[in-house]
């Protein structure tokens, strides 16, 4: 099957057209992918070299910014009902509790915690309450504004490259890596901000999960307009290693509080690989 089979028009009802898209290559190998699913005007492809799955064509940068600036992007999702005891909020609180417990076991407070993709700031506020000095970065200007105005958090509207450059002891990014334009560049930015002995903590959907494999193009987390990279345990470890990071622990169980109820996502913790004596990072 040819790579990037042209798609001339979006199906009826789709808000995006080919004019909103651009082709991309694997962030690790530079190869175009081979088509796995057609989801017009997008394609879900797999790198023939490293097996990383990604979306190409995908929304170009301006179209993605339009998507994330819409209040409906958050309000239609898991953050939709922010009343204290809504089911969505109970899940959020369970994840927050489980993830913070995993972080405090590895790098107890006090410490500097940076969250990239901090949404409305719910996790960041909990980390602050747990004794960390917290900062956030959020691409959605709506999310950044709400976090600042309602929770008094220091959240910058922007991408990882706009994040404060002073070292952080913990850098977390929940359900963010699948959204970023270039996960390798993103993780290099993370690595450059990690203090000696620091930890990363993340969650991400995984394309080798049972729902992803069973449902194919109907997998509810495929969402090709916003989820533009799809990992497995091995491809996540590969991209992390290329960025000078090592994944040390992975939680896949939906019974674990950090990943409660999630059949197709994993939570991972990791650290920086040591620099080699010649000044270069270890590589794979
Ligand atoms: Zn590749």
Image: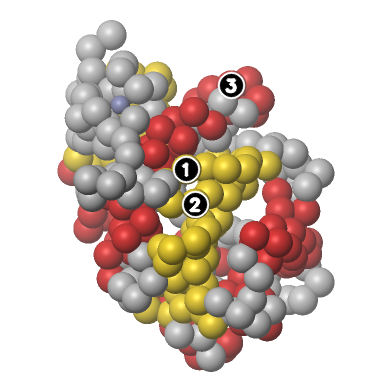
Residue 100 visible here: no
Percent of width and height locating residue 241:
39, 39
Q: Is residue 28 above or below residue 146?
A: above
Question: Ligand 1 closer than 8 Å to the CB at disc 2?
Answer: no
The 10 Å Cα crowd at callout 1, few under 14, some 14 to 19, many 20 or more, is many
What is the C-alpha distance between the residues marked 2 and 3? 29 Å
- In the image: residue 6, left or right of residue 132: left
For marks 2 and 3 on the same chain, the one whose residue lies earlier in the sequence: 3
Label 1: which residue?
246
- In the image: residue 6, left or right of residue 183: left
Quarter of image, ligand 1: top left
Q: Quadrant of residue 282?
A: top left
Of 103 and 49, nearer the camera is: 103
Q: Quadrant of the C terminus?
A: top left
* Residue drawn at point x = 62 percent, y = 43 percent: 249
* Residue drawn at point x = 45 percent, y = 85 percent: 154
Mark 2 against mark 3, which lies toward the viewer?
A: 2
The 10 Å Cα crowd at callout 2, few under 14, some 14 to 19, many 20 or more, is many
Label 2: which residue?
271
What is the C-alpha distance between the residues marked 2 and 1? 5 Å
For marks 3 and 1 on the same chain, the one whose residue lies earlier in the sequence: 3
* Residue drawn at point x = 58 percent, y = 37 percent: 220
Q: Quadrant of the N terminus?
A: top left
Percent of width and height locating residue 245:
42, 46
* Residue drawn at point x = 70 percent, y = 61 percent: 105
The secondary structure type at the circle numbered 2 is strand
Of 214 and 135, nearer the camera is: 135
Label 3: which residue?
213
CB-based contact (under 8 Å), mark 2 and mark 1? yes
Residue 148 visible here: yes
Percent of width and height locating residue 164:
33, 76
The secondary structure type at the circle numbered 3 is helix
């Amino acid at each position: 099957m040819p790579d990037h089979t042209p798609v001339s028009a979006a199906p009826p009802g789709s808000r995006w057209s080919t004019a909103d898209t651009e082709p991309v290559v694997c962030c690790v190998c530079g190869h175009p992918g081979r088509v796995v699913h057609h989801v017009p005007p997008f394609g879900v492809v797999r790198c023939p070299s490293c097996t990383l799955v990604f979306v190409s064509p995908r929304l170009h940068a301006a179209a993605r910014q339009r998507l994330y600036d819409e209040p409906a992007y958050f309000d239609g999702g898991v953050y939709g009902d922010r009343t204290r005891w809504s089911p969505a909020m109970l899940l959020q609180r369970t994840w927050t509790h489980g993830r913070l417990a995993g972080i405090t076991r590895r790098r107890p407070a006090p410490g500097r915690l940076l969250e990239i993709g901090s949404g409305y700031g719910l996790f960041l506020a909990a980390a602050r309450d747990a004794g960390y000095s917290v900062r956030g970065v959020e691409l959605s200007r709506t999310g950044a504004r709400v976090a600042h105005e309602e929770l008094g958090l220091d959240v910058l509207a922007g991408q990882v490259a706009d994040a404060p450059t002073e070292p952080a002891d913990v850098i977390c990014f929940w359900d963010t890596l699948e959204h970023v334009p270039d996960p390798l560049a993103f993780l290099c930015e993370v690595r450059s901000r990690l203090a000696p002995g620091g930890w990363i903590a993340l969650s991400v959907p995984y394309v080798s999960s049972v729902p992803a494999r069973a449902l194919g193009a109907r997998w509810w987390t495929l969402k090709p307009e916003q989820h533009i990279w799809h990992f497995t345990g091995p491809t996540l470890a590969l991209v992390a290693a290329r960025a000078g990071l090592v994944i040390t622990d992975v939680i896949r169980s939906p019974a674990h509080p950090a990943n409660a109820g999630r059949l197709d996502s994993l939570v991972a913790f990791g650290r920086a690989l040591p620099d080699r004596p010649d000044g270069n990072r270890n590589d794979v």
